[in-house]
Image (tube, helix red, strand yellow):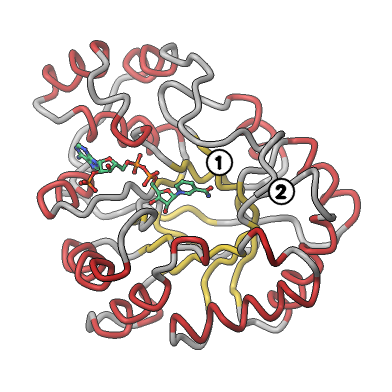
Amino acid sequence: MGAIPAITLNNAVQIPQLGFGTFQIEPEETRETTLAALEAGYRHIDTAQMYGNEKEVGQAVRDCGVDRADIFVTSKLNNDAHAHDDALKAFDRTMDELGLDYLDLFLIHWPLPGKGDFVETWKALEEIYRDGRAKSIGVSNFQPKHLNRLLQNTDVVPAVNQIEVHPYLTQDDVRAFGAEHDIATEAWSPIAQGKVLDDPTINRIAQREGKTPAQVTLRWHIQRGDIVFPKSVTQKRIEENFDIFGFELSEGDIGEISALNRDERVGPDPDTFNG
Ligand SMILES: NC(=O)c1ccc[n+]([C@@H]2O[C@H](COP(=O)([O-])OP(=O)(O)OC[C@H]3O[C@@H](n4cnc5c(N)ncnc54)[C@H](OP(=O)(O)O)[C@@H]3O)[C@@H](O)[C@H]2O)c1
């Protein structure tokens, strides 16, 4: 098994391209599951205020015996805290919950275009970044028009945009906009919460490679250059999803999987979702 590659963000910070997602992991299960991921070799954990499990993620990070500096931890601002002062207070709460001295990456979780103004929210994140309490800041679920508004009205270019991406939603336009502006794409729900795993094309390639459909799908993301953090509470899958660096898909395979796109979301549409 090869080492996890790192992606260099626009502020020179390095992020492991593969991480562990914690959405829908119950708080009671989170410490143990996150410890299992860290034990399997993951060094990047993705949580959010909305997931209600930051405390247990923090416990795992503190208890696992790996140096804090070697683990990349992301959290995200809740949708009810977009006002400037609310965002600062919410960040303080995140740090209390996690029990860590700094965060590696803090994101605005959703743009909420029908509510308030995310430019104000971003200015609060810029303060947190300048104070060094978050080593990088970014956004999630931003469309190019939302990113353009930030680029035109604020100073710090988001380090990442975390968006839904998988073979049924390839997001070519948002990813291209990110690439053009040096904003790394993080692909959430990378296996579409399991929905792509029965796909005949993905299964054919998986059989040929002697890999599972999840491994082939995650490998497709890695070779496209996105950052991924599949979620699983199942030990075997946690290990399986980590074991994707010992094989390579051809350009033809990548093209075939990309051609499965049908603009089908498993989550909300950022243009209409308002929290
Ligand atoms: N920014 C956002 O708005 C946003 C939104 C959604 C997600 N996210 C982030 O992205 C992460 C990943 O997305 P996600 O959790 O929605 O979905 P996902 O990682 O695409 O899929 C998770 C589901 O697939 C199953 N699974 C995992 N590995 C598998 C494997 N090897 N074989 C078969 N089934 C497998 C899991 O089951 P078991 O757990 O039962 O094993 C779970 O039901 C989240 O955890 C979160 O950190 C961010």
**Tag 2's secondary structure?**
loop
Residue in view at x 62 percent, y 33 percent: 269
Label disc, if present, on residue 111 of the rendered structure:
2
Residue in view at x 83 percent, y 55 percent: 116
Quadrant of the displayed image that contains ligand 1:
top left
Q: Is residue 174 above or below residue 122?
A: above
Q: Amino acid at mark 1?
A: Ile
Q: Return the x and y of residue 81 as percentages of the image width and height.
A: 70, 67
Beta carbon of the mark 1 residue lies under 8 A of ligand 1 = yes
Sequence-first disc among 2 and 1: 2
**Tag 1's secondary structure?**
strand
Q: Which is more foreground, mark 2 or mark 1?
A: 2
Q: Around disc 2, counting alpha carbons within 10 Å, would you say few (fewer than 14), some (14 to 19), or many (20 or more)?
A: many
Q: Nearer the viewer, residue 135 or 275?
A: 275
Q: Which residue, given by chain and number where applicable, does mark 1 sit on?
A: 163
Q: Return the x and y of residue 272 as percentages of the image width and height.
A: 70, 34
The Cα atoms of the two marked residues, 2 and 1, are separated by 11 Å
Residue in view at x 22 percent, y 49 percent: 242
Q: Amino acid at mark 2?
A: Pro
Q: Return the x and y of residue 43 as percentages of the image width and height.
A: 32, 65
Q: Indicate left or right for 98 with 201 as reference.
A: right
Q: Nearer the viewer, residue 15 or 241?
A: 241
Q: Is residue 244 above or below residue 136?
A: above
Q: Is residue 155 above or below residue 240?
A: below
